[in-house]
């Protein structure tokens, strides 16, 4: 995948305009075949070969040598697009807490700018998982004529109270780190970010997944510590790969904005606008986006096909159940 970048003005739903906003994106070198657009989840980036290597790449189900594949780094992320980690032109320093509040619809405006920049008038397949599914759903409603097929994986058309509670708990972890509010540099809030990531991971997995991978090897262990080490490692890992607390905070706020039905007569009416052939996939152990919810809203998309897959890894099954997803999508 090849990295690119454009700059564009983005009118913000909460007010104001993000001027000359940087938008980073990756494309495959192949410009023939189907146009496949992938929307990434919370802490991923615009290179799906990096975070979805079982699905994207040469010879993979989403073949980069046979299709023109596009993935945009969403606004608010620290991986290239305009966000708290980029320079605020007014101060010459990173935006950090001064970055404006953005919504999922603002993120889609950046996608539209990239689509036009690339001269794409039709997208054969739009794929979004988790919060990437928020983006895919919003775009499928905003420009229904553009898409031939859409796949919405482990996601929902509106942020639920349960998901909102997990988001708020993670924000509280960031705010509890005194260095976060000081905002001296991008390293502020790092300890809070580690805690937020550890909290998030619990909601991404499930009881059986932790039992299978983090049970103590010694049956006579006095104090169980393997899973504690794992949780701390995952928090540290996110910080080491360049994610900062201010970007995480911004994206948590953006998730709260997700409501496909806002100003459109409700969620059901909004989903009724979609014209693409749609596939909705739920995971049986997903606590964030349970099958009972997915099955309900999938029925509101004209002609949509609904699938439920089984996984021992909860919400993260969308990243791990490659064979099952391939059988559905391809």
Image (spheres, helix red, strand yellow):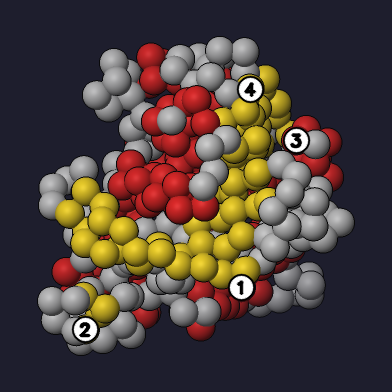
Left or right: 39, with 213 as reference point: left
Who's the residue at 19% across and 76% down the image?
A: 89
Left or right: 254, with 324 as reference point: left
Q: Are marks 3 and 1 in contact (CB under 8 Å)?
A: no
Q: Earlier in the sequence, mark 3 or mark 2?
A: 2
SS type, badge 1: helix
**Disc 1/disc 4 C-alpha distance (Å):** 40 Å
| Circle 2 residues within 10 Å: few <14, some 14–19, many ≥20 | few
SS type, badge 2: strand
Circle nearer the viewer, 1 or 4:
4
Label for residue 230? 1
SS type, badge 3: helix
Q: Which residue is mark 2?
A: 93
Spot occupied by residue 167 in the image (x, y as percentages of width and height):
36, 52
Circle nearer the viewer, 3 or 4:
4
Residue 287 position by quadrant: top right
| Residue that sits furthest to the front in the current view | 119
Q: Which residue is mark 3?
A: 329
Q: Earlier in the sequence, mark 3 or mark 1?
A: 1
**Disc 3/disc 4 C-alpha distance (Å):** 12 Å
SS type, badge 4: strand
**Disc 4/disc 2 C-alpha distance (Å):** 45 Å
Q: Are marks 2 and 1 in contact (CB under 8 Å)?
A: no
Label for residue 277? 4
Who's the residue at 31% across and 82% down the image?
A: 186
Circle nearer the viewer, 3 or 1:
3
């Amino acid at each position: 995948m090849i990295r690119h970048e454009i700059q564009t003005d983005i009118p913000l739903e909460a007010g104001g305009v993000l001027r000359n906003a940087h938008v980073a994106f990756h494309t495959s070198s192949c410009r023939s075949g189907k146009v496949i657009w992938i929307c990434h989840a919370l802490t991923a980036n615009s290179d799906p070969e990096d975070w979805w290597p079982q699905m994207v790449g040469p010879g993979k189900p989403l073949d980069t040598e046979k299709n023109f594949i596009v993935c945009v780094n969403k606004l608010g992320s620290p991986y290239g697009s305009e966000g708290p980690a980029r320079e605020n032109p007014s101060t010459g320093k990173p935006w950090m807490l001064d970055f404006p509040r953005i919504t999922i619809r603002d993120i889609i405006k950046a996608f539209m700018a990239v689509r036009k920049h690339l001269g794409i008038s039709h997208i054969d397949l739009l794929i979004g998982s988790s919060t990437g599914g928020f983006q895919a759903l919003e775009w499928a409603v905003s420009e229904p004529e553009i898409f031939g097929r859409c796949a919405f994986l482990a996601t929902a058309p509106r942020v639920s109270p349960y998901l909102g509670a997990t988001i708020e708990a993670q924000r509280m972890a960031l705010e509890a780190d005194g260095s976060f509010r000081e905002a001296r540099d991008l390293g502020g809030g790092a300890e809070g970010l580690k805690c937020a990531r550890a909290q998030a991971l619990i909601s991404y997995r499930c009881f059986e997944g932790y039992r299978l991978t983090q049970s103590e090897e010694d049956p006579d262990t006095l104090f169980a510590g393997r899973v504690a080490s794992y949780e701390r490692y995952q928090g540290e890992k996110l910080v080491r790969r360049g994610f900062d607390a201010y970007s995480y905070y911004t994206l948590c706020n953006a998730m709260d904005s997700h409501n496909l039905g806002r100003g459109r007569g409700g969620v059901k009416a909004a989903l009724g606008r979609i014209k693409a052939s749609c596939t909705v996939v739920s995971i049986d152990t997903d606590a964030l986006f349970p099958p009972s919810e997915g099955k309900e809203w999938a029925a509101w998309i004209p002609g949509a096909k609904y699938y439920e897959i089984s996984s021992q890894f909860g919400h993260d099954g969308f990243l791990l159940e490659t064979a099952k997803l391939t059988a559905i999508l391809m």
